[in-house]
Image (spheres, grey):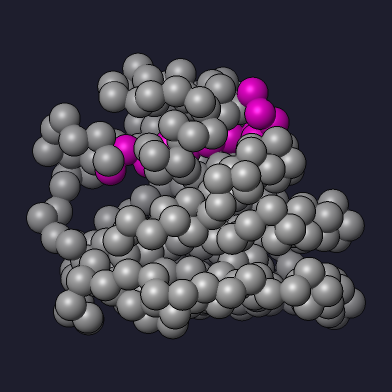
């Protein structure tokens, strides 16, 4: 029997519901894919910032992976906020043990409000041990600067950073250009394993309601891959989904508000 498409989010929770595992669940569900989870950390968080966080024990992370592998047919997976070195290494260990399909690594390091979500020593472990497992890496500009060990101020810098990130072992990369404030558009740069590259521009929207954009993009791509979409098509759908979720905003909270995960129209659903 051909099972319904299933995807996995390996991430921390956002008690405010706008980012992290909660954003992943909303996005994957909206793309008509069954969402599963491995929770690695808990945050006390809202649109104003992150007030506290707690990483889960490695044994509990291992148990969640084993439970899913024993029963479900997961076709694609993604990582989000991984907190610290032991957590990153626990995730790497389990991804090597179980085949959950193509892996999208969203190297979450800094929250929209500026709070650090990944310890400094864990950044090197992500680069050296997790990225080599990645089918796709989806850093924003600050994250790409850390992973590529360079300053990014131009589109040519983005292309060079993409090459450096592929050199870490990641097969494909999107560098999200929203932090490059030299135009009225926000262009993401995509470099594929084949050598093909392309830009995905989007007109900037004057809003602070962008909490969870990175999580949402990577989750949408993961859902599309679970349905069997090709990578370039999954990436373009992810970009369109996030663009719609920002444009058709909702008012929640008093800070960096969440996206509208209902915004992408049903008739845009791709099989």
Segment colored magenta: 167-178
Percent position of residue 200, x then y: 33, 38
Residue 246 occupies which quadrant of the picture?
A: bottom left
Residue 184 occupies which quadrant of the picture?
A: top left
- Which of 122/200 is in front? 122
> Residue at horizontal 74%, vertical 68%?
74
Q: Is residue 124 magenta?
A: no
Percent position of residue 61, x then y: 76, 72
> Residue at horizontal 68%, vertical 74%?
56
- Which of 113/140 is in front? 113
Check the image and report above or below for 118 versus 257.
above
In-image side of 111 versus 113 (left or right) = right
Secondary structure predominantly adopted by residues drawn in magenta? loop
In-image side of 192 versus 74 (left or right) = left
Percent position of residue 111, x then y: 38, 59
Percent position of residue 108, x then y: 50, 53
In-image side of 176 versus 136 (left or right) = left
Tell me if I can see residue 107 in this picture: yes
In-image side of 131 versus 159 (left or right) = right
> Residue at horizontal 74%, vertical 41%?
129
Q: How many tags in the picture? A: 0
Check the image and report above or below for 118 versus 135.
below
> Residue at horizontal 70%, vertical 61%?
87
Check the image and report above or below for 120 versus 189.
below
């Amino acid at each position: 029997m051909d099972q319904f498409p299933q995807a996995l989010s390996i991430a921390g929770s956002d008690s405010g519901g706008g980012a992290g595992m909660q954003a992943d669940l909303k996005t994957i569900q909206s793309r008509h894919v069954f969402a599963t989870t491995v929770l690695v950390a808990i945050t006390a968080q809202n649109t104003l910032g992150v007030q506290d966080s707690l990483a889960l024990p490695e044994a509990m992370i291992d148990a969640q992976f084993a439970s899913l592998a024993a029963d479900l047919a997961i076709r694609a997976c993604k990582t989000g906020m991984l907190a610290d070195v032991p957590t990153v290494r626990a995730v790497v260990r389990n991804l090597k043990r179980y085949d959950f399909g193509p892996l999208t690594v969203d190297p979450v390091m800094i929250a929209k409000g500026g709070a650090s979500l990944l310890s400094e020593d864990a950044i090197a472990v992500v680069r050296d041990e997790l990225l080599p497992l990645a089918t796709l890496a989806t850093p924003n500009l600050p994250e790409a600067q850390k992973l590529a060990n360079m300053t990014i101020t131009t589109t040519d810098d983005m292309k060079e950073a993409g090459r450096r990130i592929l050199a870490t072992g990641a097969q494909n990369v999107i560098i999200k250009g929203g932090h490059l404030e030299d135009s009225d558009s926000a262009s993401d740069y995509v470099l594929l394993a084949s050598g093909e590259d392309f830009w995905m521009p989007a007109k900037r929207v004057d809003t602070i309601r962008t909490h969870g954009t990175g999580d949402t993009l990577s989750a949408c791509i993961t859902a599309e891959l679970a349905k069997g979409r090709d990578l370039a098509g999954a990436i373009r759908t992810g970009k369109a989904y996030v663009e719609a979720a920002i444009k058709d905003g909702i008012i929640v909270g008093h800070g960096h508000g969440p996206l509208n995960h209902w915004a992408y129209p049903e008739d845009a659903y791709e099989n």
